[in-house]
Image (cartoon, rainbow, N blue to C red):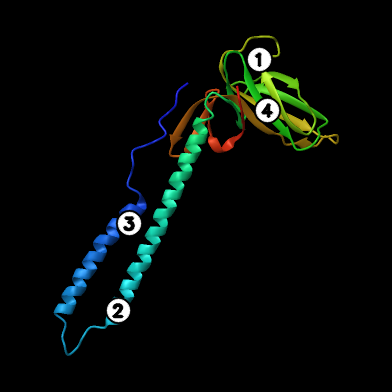
Amino acid sequence: MAVSPIGTPAQPTQSAGATAKLADTYDSFLRLLTTQLKFQDPLSPMDSNQFVEQLVQFSGVEQQIAINKNLEQLLSLESNNVASTAINMIGKMAMAEGDTIGLTDGEAKYAYDLPKNAESVTIAILNEQGQIVYSTPGQTTQGNHEFAWDGESSSGETMPEGEYTVRVSATDADGNAITAATYIIGRVTRVDSGADGISIVIGGIKVPVGTVRSVREA
């Protein structure tokens, strides 16, 4: 089991860059103000209200940058918490939203959720070319149902390892279609951190950690 690096070298944040830029601008403003006060005409002094207004504007910008900095820190803490939670999933069985998972060691596990009782349910397994290689009736009661495919086609042929998709077709007593949510189930083997956030790998498939619906011991 491998763990991709979660931590990354510290990068300058937007608030840090804005703070540095504000400091430079503020210093320039103070130097300009001092110079103007030094060389102002005593008989026609400058309007101090303009300087006060600019100081107030600088103060408002400074406060906004401070707020952004605090938000960045909160987001960083939240990201670290998510990463820690994801790492603790490694080696455990997780159920995540999705319909495609890799056939590994002759098994692929799925689940589907029915919002209400169905009259009939058909579970179909499709290969990477979109061809149905296996189909079977499924449970029709409302709720979550797990399904383990042993990697054999409907004709008894052993299918090669690869990615396979589950398709659940359900209808009620009036023949109306019922939409069933589908999930993939597998052992968590890796945790990745990227631009899109924290992801875990289940059965060779990378899924966002936010799509995980349950975790249990293997």
The CA distance from mark 3 to mark 4 is 48 Å
The CA distance from mark 2 to mark 1 is 78 Å
Measuring 61% from the left and 20% from the top, which residue is drawn there? 127
Q: Earlier in the sequence, mark 2 or mark 1?
A: 2
Q: Secondary structure at mark 1?
A: loop
Measuring 30% from the left and 81% from the top, which residue is drawn there? 49
The CA distance from mark 4 to mark 2 is 67 Å
Q: Amino acid at mark 4?
A: Ala
Q: Earlier in the sequence, mark 3 or mark 4?
A: 3
The CA distance from mark 1 to mark 4 is 14 Å
Where 129 falls versus 113 (above or below)?
Answer: above
Q: Amino acid at mark 2?
A: Gln
Measuring 26% from the left and 65% from the top, which residue is drawn there? 26
The CA distance from mark 3 to mark 2 is 24 Å
Q: Position of residue 122 (x, y in %)?
A: 75, 25
Q: Earlier in the sequence, mark 3 or mark 2?
A: 3
Q: Position of residue 1 (x, y in %)?
A: 47, 21
**Residue on which the image places disc 3:** 18
Q: Earlier in the sequence, mark 1 or mark 4?
A: 4
Q: Position of residue 206 (x, y in %)?
A: 52, 29
Are there few (<14), some (14-19), or many (20+) residues within 10 Å of tag 2?
few
Q: Amino acid at mark 3?
A: Ala
